[in-house]
């Protein structure tokens, strides 16, 4: 069975080459470029830590985009995870035609990053768009969603939340693995539906909640399509997230060295927040088979 081991290595060779060429090589090169001044025309010039010193001490736009990115993540991640869990809980009931609704609710995750949806979103939140039309019908004043810095962030947050399909599918799989006997026992003891959800469902799916929180946090810090296609970072840089700033520095101003430094700051930020999340998980994430809380 294991006589021809080279054949197995031959099968995994495309994957290994893909990782080396498209993952590891750009990873190392971007780190090296972060210590240089490079504009795609002239050869890279080594400048040491100058790029990092500039973004830390002499770049107010970096601090602005970093604050916008953190605000976006704080608003969007809990909304997407919470909404995905709510929809998954609703779709977990055995009803006629439920498979159709499961597919329909997953559809936004497929279409959410497309140009057509961005155009549709701009139309919905335009001055004379659908949202303002509905607001005027109930006697409310229309809002300049895309032109007011106090409301523009919410258009991006809602688009990010709307693409909850992948998290919903994972939650749905976790909910279907919760033993029905636990709900039956709780119902015999007089527990309400809310008590059953909070005391049975949530503790049993905390590993899945933790996984979705980490994944959606990473996606939030990498969010680019929404701010780029809908608001273009405006108004007054209120939606100018860090990924959009990296794109402008690298491919609009051709300052690739500085863009690489910005990308590594973003990577360090995501890695740090992920490490903190893993550390905190020992206090609220419960895995099957554990008898004592982890310390």
Image (cartoon, helix red, strand yellow):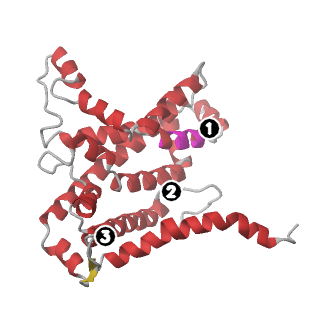
Q: Which residue lies furthest to the top in this view?
A: 137
- Name the residue carrying label 3: 260
* Residue 203 drawn in magenta: no
- Name the residue carrying label 1: 176
Is the stretch drawn in magenta largely helix, strand or loop? helix
The reply to whether dot 3 and dot 1 touch (C-beta < 8 Å) is: no
The reply to whether dot 2 and dot 3 touch (C-beta < 8 Å) is: no
Compare marks 1 and 2 and give the one earlier in the sequence. Answer: 1
- Name the residue carrying label 2: 285
From the viewer's perspective, is residue 18 above or below residue 136?
Answer: below
Q: How far apart are marks 2 and 3 (CA)?
A: 35 Å
Q: Nearer the viewer, residue 245 or 22?
A: 22
In the structure shown, which secondary structural element does the residue marked by tag 1 occupy?
helix
Residue at x 37%, y 76% (from the top left corner) = 31
* Residue 95 at x, y percent in the picture: 59, 21
Residue at x 34%, y 38% (from the top left corner) = 115
Residue 205 appears anywhere in the view: yes
From the viewer's perspective, is residue 18 above or below residue 46?
Answer: above
Mark 3 crowdedness (10 Å alpha carbons): few <14, some 14-19, many ≥20: many
| Left/right of residue 125 with respect to residue 31 in the rendered view | left
Q: Distance between the residues labelled 1 and 2?
A: 19 Å
Camera-side mark, 2 or 3: 3
């Amino acid at each position: 069975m294991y006589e021809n081991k080279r054949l197995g290595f031959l099968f995994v060779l495309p994957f290994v080459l893909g990782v080396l060429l498209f993952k590891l090589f750009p990873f190392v090169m971007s780190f090296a470029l972060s210590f240089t001044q490079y504009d795609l025309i002239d050869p890279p010039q080594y400048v040491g830590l100058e790029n990092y010193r500039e973004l830390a001490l002499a770049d107010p736009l970096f601090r602005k985009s970093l604050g916008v990115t953190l605000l976006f993540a704080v608003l969007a991640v809990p909304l997407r995870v919470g909404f995905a869990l709510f929809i998954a809980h609703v779709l977990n009931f055995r009803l006629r035609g439920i498979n159709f609704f499961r597919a329909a609710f997953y559809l936004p995750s497929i279409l959410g990053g497309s140009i057509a949806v961005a155009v549709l979103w701009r139309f919905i939140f335009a001055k004379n768009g659908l949202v303002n039309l509905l607001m005027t019908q109930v006697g409310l004043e229309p809002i300049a969603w895309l032109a007011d810095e106090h409301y523009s962030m919410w258009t991006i947050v809602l688009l990010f939340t709307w693409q909850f399909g992948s998290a919903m599918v994972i939650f749905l799989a976790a909910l279907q693995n919760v033993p029905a006997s636990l709900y039956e026992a709780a119902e015999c003891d007089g527990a309400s539906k809310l008590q059953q959800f909070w005391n049975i469902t949530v503790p049993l799916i905390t590993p899945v909640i933790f996984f979705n929180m980490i994944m959606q946090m990473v996606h939030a810090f990498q969010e680019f399509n929404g701010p780029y296609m809908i608001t273009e970072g405006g108004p007054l840089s209120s939606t100018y997230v860090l990924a959009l700033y990296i794109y402008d520095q690298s491919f609009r101003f051709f300052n690739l060295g500085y863009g690489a430094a910005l990308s590594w700051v973003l990577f360090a930020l995501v890695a740090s927040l992920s490490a903190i999340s893993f550390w905190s998980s020992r206090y609220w994430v419960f895995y099957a088979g554990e008898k004592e809380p982890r310390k």
